[in-house]
Image (cartoon, grey):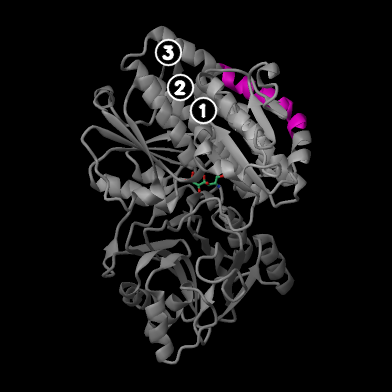
């Protein structure tokens, strides 16, 4: 994982790279570092913790950066989050500094060889190996030294390197990890994500796998693995001046939960065709003929995106009667997938950077399947590599815990399912009835948000428990998985999402008075069964907090507490119930004093396998 940001050609380059780095904090935030030159020598600073800590340290040192700086934010893979393990890593004489994103799979062998040659290591990282390798190979130029070292390295990685003999140059390389170069008025920037460039940077060059780049002030040279120059036109990327501000909110997470009505309206805008009871989706890059030829759909995702995918799969089967398989990308990529003709792949990823999803997509593309990406970040790897894209239009999601991106994923998937259904057996009236419910969704979400004080009160009661069950059936099963994930990730409470009917096949052994159950009961078709399952919980002295859309008397005797949500059709009830789950997780985490926006051990985009 980790984020790389560099720049050449600016007087106060340290400030500039730290500001870029802040926009990459979603890629990791356990430690950070920066290097630059002073009197032709490399100087650096590293700090454990957030970029703000590094910022203070460089300020204190008066480290301004002389035309060039290279920085890194880390999410630990090899070695604990310590100052020694933070990047940049330097060679023994401090002549070379390197930042690295990704994993060097053969680092142990390389480390052993280097140690045998007398090299002393200061960190536990795989990254330091690369710094020593390149430094040992340095003869006259950094480009050559990097090029000669690369064949020794196995894995997926991106690097940025500087050397004291070339104080005006950054050398960069990537293999299965993103790197982009942006240029503006004599300044050249390097970043793991083009969205981190200053807003005036519009022209961007993406490095392809195996390419080496030499960056100097206002100059970019690209080379292949043999150092043959490559010509590449820059792309003009759409830049949205994104507002990274919490406003009056204590946390981005709550702000983003509250933004959901607006985000859903954005997701629906110009994508519905009420008179025909259908959806019109730009960016699919598939003709009507190709859509009609889709015989099966395969959905891939990780974490929250996987949960949205389960809901999407159910909706596509229910509305369009197209068989749909849902898979966890990290598992699927190693399964040597069987891809039958007529398969459409939908890869769901908010960031568009999740390494497992990207790898699964690449595998499926080699098998010839068309891939549609559903995601939020323009210019991301999947935005570029997928055959078609459906943007979530959720706006930037800063909180590590995905909230508005999830609900928009479900909404966009519902539009896709509706469109596919209307192209098959679904009638115009059925389509219109579905759209009626979809259009009401933003207001219904708002109703839940308006009553969030009630959920905050319930959170005070439930925050003391260390184990939870989240139960649901049909559409409420993935909602349970998602709500349990929210609680785990931001409050560090052990929470199990489970299909309610499966409880009796084992996990019911865990139910007692100190393990509450959050029950999502708003799937109308399974309500009576769900009620019976909750009775089984009550019979074992389990505390039940039910998310319900029916008259509270219907749950008398089975629910100790209720969160009331508006009633809608089963597929869309998943959105409403999830908002209740998000608020519950948020307020419990708040009660427990957790770091809600940046929970421990996590990163917004998981860019390693
Ligand atoms: C959700 O709250 C998580 N932070 C996480 O599960 C996330 O959804 C997952 O890592 C996938 O990310 P993506 O959507 O960017 O691919």
Give coordinates of residue 173: x percent, y percent: 39, 65
Give coordinates of residue 410: x percent, y percent: 49, 30
Specify the quadrant of the image occupied by residue 555: top right
Callout 1 secondary element: helix
Q: Which residue is mark 3?
A: 431
Quick check: marks 1 and 2 in contact, CB under 8 Å? yes
Give coordinates of residue 561: x percent, y percent: 72, 29
Find the distance from the CA under tag 3 to the CA under tag 2: 14 Å
Closest to the observer: 11 or 391?
Answer: 391
Q: Which residues are magenta?
A: 440-455
Find the distance from the CA under tag 3 to the CA under tag 1: 18 Å
Specify the quadrant of the image occupied by residue 312: top left
Q: Residue at x 35, y 76 (%)?
A: 149
Q: From the Cβ of disc 2, is ligand 1 less than 8 Å away?
A: no
Q: Which residue is mark 1?
A: 267
Nearer the observer: mark 3 or 1; the answer is 3
Q: Which residue is mark 2?
A: 271
Specify the quadrant of the image occupied by residue 551: top right
Q: Is residue 605 rendered magenta in the image?
A: no
């Amino acid at each position: 994982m980790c984020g790389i940001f560099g720049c050449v050609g600016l007087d106060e380059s340290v400030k500039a790279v730290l500001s870029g780095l802040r926009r990459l904090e979603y890629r990791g935030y356990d430690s950070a570092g920066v290097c630059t030159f002073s009197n032709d020598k490399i100087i650096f600073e590293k700090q454990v913790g957030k970029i703000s800590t590094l910022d203070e340290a460089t300020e204190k040192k008066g480290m301004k950066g002389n035309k060039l700086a290279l920085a890194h934010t880390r999410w630990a893979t090899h070695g604990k989050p310590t100052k020694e393990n933070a990047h940049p890593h330097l060679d023994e004489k401090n002549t070379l500094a390197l930042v690295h994103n990704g994993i060097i799979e053969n680092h142990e062998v390389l480390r052993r060889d280097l140690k045998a040659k007398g090299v002393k290591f200061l960190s536990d990282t795989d990254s330091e190996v690369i710094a020593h390798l390149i430094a040992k190979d340095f003869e006259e130029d950094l480009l050559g030294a990097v090029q000669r070292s690369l064949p020794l390295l196995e894995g997926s990685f991106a690097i940025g390197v500087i050397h004291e003999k070339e104080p005006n140059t950054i050398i960069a390389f990537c293999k299965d990890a993103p790197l982009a170069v942006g240029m503006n008025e004599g300044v050249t920037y390097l970043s793991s994500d083009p969205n981190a460039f200053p807003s005036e940077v519009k022209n961007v060059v993406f490095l392809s796998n195996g390419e080496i780049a030499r960056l100097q002030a206002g100059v970019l040279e690209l080379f292949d693995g043999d150092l043959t120059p490559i010509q590449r036109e820059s792309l003009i990327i759409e830049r949205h001046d994104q507002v990274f501000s919490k406003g009056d909110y204590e946390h981005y997470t709550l702000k983003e939960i509250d933004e959901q009505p607006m985000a859903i309206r954005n997701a629906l805008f110009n994508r519905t065709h009420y008179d025909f009871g259908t959806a019109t989706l730009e960016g699919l890059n598939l003709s009507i003929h190709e859509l009609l030829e889709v015989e099966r759909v395969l959905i891939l995702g990780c974490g929250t995106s996987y949960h949205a995918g389960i809901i999407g799969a159910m909706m596509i089967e229910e509305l369009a009667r197209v068989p749909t398989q849902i898979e966890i990308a990290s598992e699927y990529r190693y399964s040597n997938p069987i891809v039958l003709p007529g398969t459409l792949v939908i890869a769901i990823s908010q960031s568009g950077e999740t390494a497992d999803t990207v790898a699964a997509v690449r595998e499926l593309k080699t098998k010839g399947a068309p891939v549609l990406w559903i995601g939020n970040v323009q210019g991301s790897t999947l935005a570029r590599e997928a055959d078609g894209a459906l943007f979530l239009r959720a706006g930037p999601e800063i909180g590590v815990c995905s909230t508005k991106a999830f609900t928009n994923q479900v909404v966009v998937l519902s539009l896709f399912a509706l469109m596919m259904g209307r192209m098959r057996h679904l009638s115009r009236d059925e389509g219109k009835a579905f759209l009626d419910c979809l259009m009401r969704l933003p207001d219904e979400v708002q109703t839940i948000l308006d009553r969030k004080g009630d959920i905050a009160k319930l959170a005070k009661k439930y925050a003391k428990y260390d184990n939870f069950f989240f139960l649901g059936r049909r559409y409420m099963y993935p909602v349970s998985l998602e709500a349990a994930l929210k609680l785990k990730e931001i409050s560090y409470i052990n929470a199990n999402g489970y299909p309610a009917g499966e409880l009796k096949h084992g996990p019911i052994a865990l139910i007692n008075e100190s393990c509450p159950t959050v029950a999502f009961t708003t799937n109308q078709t399974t309500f009576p069964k769900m009620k019976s399952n909750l009775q089984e919980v009550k019979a074992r002295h389990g505390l039940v907090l039910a998310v319900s859309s029916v008259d509270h008397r219907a749950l008398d005797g089975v629910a100790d507490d209720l969160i009331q949500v508006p009633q809608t059709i089963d597929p869309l009830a998943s959105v409403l119930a999830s908002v209740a789950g998000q608020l519950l997780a948020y307020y419990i985490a708040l009660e427990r004093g957790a770091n809600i926006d940046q929970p421990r051990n996590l990163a917004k985009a998981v860019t390693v396998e």
